Image (spheres, rainbow, N blue to C red):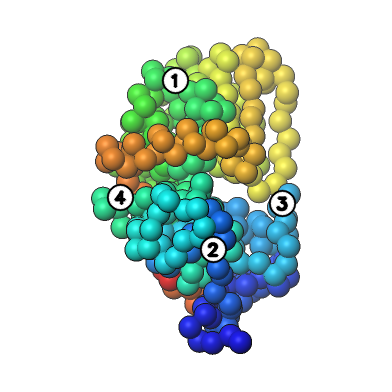
Amino acid sequence: MATARNMMRAVRVFEFGGPEVLKLQSDVLLPVPKENQVLIKVHACGVNPVETYIRSGAYSRKPSLPYTPGSDVAGVIEAVGEHVTLFKKDDRVFTRGTISGGYADYAVASTDTVFPLSDKLDFKQGAAIGVPYFTAFHALFQKGRAKAGESVLVHGASGGVGIATCQIARAYGLRVLGTAGTPEGMNIVLRNGAHKVFNHREADYVDKIKEFIGMQGVDVIIEMLANVNLATDLHLLSQGGRVMIVGSRGPIEINPRDTMSKESSVIGVALFSAAKEEMRECAAALLAGIEASWLRPVIGPEYPLEKVAKAHENLIHSSGALGKMVLLI
């Protein structure tokens, strides 16, 4: 029989749709960690754009209903399953995935997606690492083949993935250009690794980028809104340049000839398609970045679990990203 002690609050989605389908319930059964799993007392959970697409039913991968969203939690180990030796009760941790869902008081995660959280970072920052930083590293190096000395343009650099990309690229010796849509966003981008930032709300910002980069072009573009920017991106690339599509909210028409003379590439990026070995490489690089203090997530809007629908609404409709959105549990 369920008692108060084995119940928790969790956001449940019973049907796909708008933010209003996110239902906070207080009588959800506490999940139990199985073999090679841990139970985490969640202190904060990152909110990622992909979670809004999944919730709406518009994403290629749909979870079985009902489900609890959320992959990037930070908190404290509450219990461990069988054969778990790397973690113990009360360890501070962060995740890049959960099994039971992160928009909840507690979450179960597989040990291969759980990492120790350094005392250098708080729980909010821990919840801002998963999808943004793993995506940024995967896009830049594993798919984009970026090298020290090359240039990268982060198109939409003031959000979670954008800031992560700027920090990583600067640490690895790239020349970093970014765009943002507000003066505050531009300042955040400059403070987090960009050598130069442009306002993508200015009508002539593309001309300003071309003027800055000259005939050489940009080696790698990390693109957060391909349905708006992809055609323009192709004109900004260097010989052999690569556009990495991290985000897109619809279709766009491009001229394939624009890829031919420069032999440029357009490559899609999806973290769920990455190999386990790639994820291990990402984790090693990012944990080293935390230790070296160049990996420092910037926290943006914060919402209590009760305001999760508002968080989803604002994530898509805000005038410009300013750091990483998190839920405080």
Which of the two discs, 3 and 2, labels the residue nearer the N terminus? 2
Q: Which amino acid, mark 3?
A: Arg
Residue 61 appears in the picture as rendered: yes
In this figure, which residue is indicated by the disc labeled 4?
118
Labels 1 and 4 touching (C-beta < 8 A): no
Count neighbours of disc 4 (C-alpha within 10 A) and say few if under 14, some if 14 to 19, many if 20 or more. some
Q: Which amino acid, mark 4?
A: Ser
Count neighbours of disc 2 (C-alpha within 10 A) and say few if under 14, some if 14 to 19, many if 20 or more. many
Query: Which quadrant: the C terminus?
Result: bottom left
Residue 46 at x, y percent in the picture: 47, 58
Q: Tag 1's secondary structure?
A: loop
From mark 2 to mark 4, how far is it between C-alphas? 23 Å
Q: Tag 4's secondary structure?
A: loop
Residue 304 at x, y percent in the picture: 44, 73
Residue 186 at x, y percent in the picture: 37, 44
From mark 3 to mark 1, how far is it between C-alphas? 32 Å
Labels 3 and 4 touching (C-beta < 8 A): no
From mark 1 to mark 2, how far is it between C-alphas? 41 Å
Please say if 298 is above or below 208. Answer: below
* Mark in the foreground, 2 or 4: 2
Query: Which quadrant: the N terminus?
Result: bottom right
At horizontal 61% and vertical 67% (from top left) the residue drawn is 68
188 relative to 223 in the view: left or right: left
In this figure, which residue is indicated by the disc labeled 2?
33
